[in-house]
Structure formats: structure tokens, C-alpha cells
Image: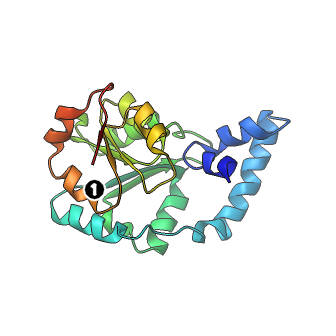
Amino acid sequence: MEILTSWIGPPIQDSFRDILPDNSPTAIARAVGLFRDRFATVGIFENEVYAGIPNALETLISSGHRLVLATSKPEPFAVRILEHFDLANYFTSVYGSSFDGSLSDKGELIAHALVQEALDPAAAVMVGDRKHDVLGAAKCGIPCVGVLYGYGSQQELQEAGAALLCETPADLPVVLQDATHLDAIWEPDRHSRY
């Protein structure tokens, strides 16, 4: 299970590169193709929404937050997942990687979303559950709230530099209610837990 958990978050090409005996571009492309064929018809619906997420998203929207999704999943898959689980209406935009592998680096993806949405990095906060989210946000000069109900551990998120850690989805609206508070405590060598 630990090997599979390590696959959640990073670009799928990187995960296959790490485990395939033949990690040539051709072998990786074939493995990615087979994975995506199954994911597009079956795996996409095997996701589950964490308890409390719809309420947290509703509270964030009601509080005036603008939610933009940035995921390493291919964008069409991300859109289908949000629609299937009735979460699409909470997000003003969805950004994901391309099937050709572009924008699979979280930092590049977040930077792309910031530009496309004309968002000021000083007013943005990333919420994520893996080190890739934290490190990608840091590349763009924005803090990241690490969520402990996801796949990353407290240690992983802290070592990556998460500004705060949230135990449950209900914590998010409280933590994000004042982004200036978050900016004030975001330092690479300081970690807080909410």
C-alpha cells in the first residue's frame, strides 16, 4: 500500500519512471497509456469525497473566497471527477496537466493558473496534501496549507514547508478566513498546526 500511496500526488510519468525496469520514454508512455485507459472508464469513479468537503467548500465560497483547482491529473479527468461528485460548482476554474505531460510539474501548473486567473501570488494560498503541492506553491511564492486528511503525512508536509496543517476539512475555512494572518506566519523554518 505504501508504494501505491507514493503515487498519489506526483506526475504519473515520474511514478512509472521510478518502478519500470525499462524506464525508456517508450515504456513509460505505454504504461501511462494503459493506466489512463483504465482510469478514464473505471478509476475515475473510484474516488471518494472526504467527509466534510462539500460543507467546507460551501463555507469558503460564502466567505468570499475564490476557489481554483490545480491538480497533476490531466485536466479533462479533473473536470469529470468534479462533475461526477457534484463539486464543479464550487470552483471558478480547473487547471490540470496535459496528456502530453506538460504542466505536470506542480510549480509550473500553479504559475500557469496564477497567470491565467490574473491572481496576485501575495493574495493566494495553496491547499494540498502532498509535498508536491507545498513545494509547487513555494516556487510561486505562495504559502501552502497542508491537509492531514489526505495522503501526505505530517512529517512530509512539514519537511516540505507547509505554513499550517489542518486536521479536517472543517479547519480550512477557519485557517483561510484571513490570508494576511497566514502570510504573517509563513516562513520556511516555522511550522504551525491548526
Q: Is the residue 31 above or below the residue 132 in the image?
A: below
| Residue found farthest to the top | 189
Judged left or right of residue 139, residue 9 is right
x 28%, y 65%: residue: 56
Residue 47 drawn at (x, y percent): 55, 67
Judged left or right of residue 144, residue 37 is right
| Residue found farthest to the right | 22
Judged left or right of residue 92, residue 148 is right
Q: Amino acid at mark 1?
A: Leu
x 51%, y 54%: residue: 75
In the rendered image, which quarter is residue 11 located in?
top right
Front one among 105 and 132: 132
Residue 85 drawn at (x, y percent): 46, 73
Secondary element at tag 1 = helix
x 30%, y 59%: residue: 92
Residue 71 drawn at (x, y percent): 47, 50
In the rendered image, which quarter is residue 21 located in?
top right
Q: Quadrant of the N terminus?
A: bottom right
x 31%, y 34%: residue: 191
Residue 107 drawn at (x, y percent): 44, 34
Crowding near the residue tagged with mark 1, few <14, some 14–19, many ≥20 C-alpha atoms within 10 Å? many
Judged left or right of residue 68, residue 81 is right
What scheme was used to colour the molecule? rainbow
Count the marks: how many?
Answer: 1
Q: Is the residue 19 above or below the residue 94 in the image?
A: above
Residue identified by numbered label 1: 172
